[in-house]
Amino acid sequence: KQEVTQIPAALSVPEGENLVLNCSFTDSAIYNLQWFRQDPGKGLTSLLLIQSSQREQTSGRLNASLDKSSGRSTLYIAASQPGDSATYLCAVIGGGSNYKLTFGKGTLLTVNP
Amino acid sequence: DAGVTQSPTHLIKTRGQQVTLRCSPKSGHDTVSWYQQALGQGPQFIFQYYEEEERQRGNFPDRFSGHQFPNYSSELNVNALLLGDSALYLCASSTQDAYGYTFGSGTRLTVV
């Protein structure tokens, strides 16, 4: 059974800091990995998707890496802004006939002005 | 280009009642999944529909059922509501190869 863990559970940083969010998964046989952002009480916004054959993806100030063999992914946020405050969720898709996303509990990020 | 649309946004029901939630997928997507998210938790997979059939199901009781229509839209039905069914229900759409998912804004269900 796939399990996804996100560390830390919460993070508070001053504006302008670079930060790293961590995600680990127990079964390395994944199809791809997706990072999402969730604002309080809202739906999920996709940030980055990394296919199992890729090592990293970048979008603006965000960079996500994937080390499938060790079951780890990191989301790097450069020059953080107060508008980045949200919960960040990591999810993996198993592949084969397993189409579901398995999520971690998320990291609650607060960026202070 | 419209993304995933869910209705209603909020709903209050009494224990024992039945509820239907609706979802229209993103244009170009033919697969719809439903997730339940309790407060402070990650979303939990309920089931996925493709070609109007349930393709995969998570660990949820039979009180949770669904349907997909020929236009790819979907409904989630929950019977005999329990207080523990109170949660944010999220719909996600994708192409059939599950390459990546797009989520809707969710329906907040409160059971009293």
Image (cartoon, coloured by chain):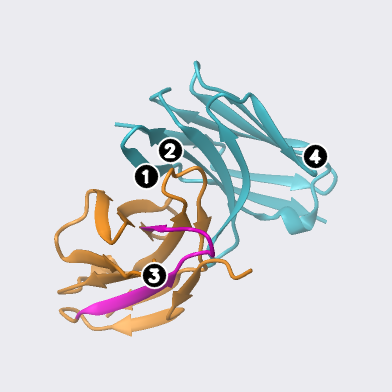
Mark 2 sits on what residue?
A: A93
Instruction: Please report, as a chain letter, where disc 4 is located.
Output: A
Rendering coords of residue A86 (x, y %): 63, 55
Task: Using the numbered discs, state the Cα–Cα distance from disc 4 to disc 2 in whole angstroms.
Answer: 26 Å
Q: Is residue A92 above or below residue A68?
A: below
Q: Residue at (39%, 34%) from the top-left corner?
A: A94
Q: Is residue B92 above or below residue A103?
A: below
Classify mark 3: helix, strand or loop: loop
Q: Earlier in the sequence, mark 4 or mark 2?
A: 4
- Foreground: disc 2 or disc 3: 3
Mark 4 sits on what residue?
A: A78
Classify mark 2: helix, strand or loop: strand
- Do the residues marked 1 and 2 share a common chain? yes
> In this picture, which residue range is highlighted in magenta?
B18-33
Instruction: Please report, as a chain letter, where disc 3 is located.
Output: B
Q: Residues within 10 Å of mark 4 (few under 14, many from 20)?
A: some
Q: Residues within 10 Å of mark 1 (few under 14, many from 20)?
A: many
- Do the residues marked 4 and 2 share a common chain? yes
Which quarter of the image is occupied by the N terminus of chain B?
bottom right
Rendering coords of residue B48 (x, y %): 32, 54
Please give left or right for residue A80 compared with residue B40 in the image: right
Q: Which chain is orange?
A: B
Mark 3 sits on what residue?
A: B73
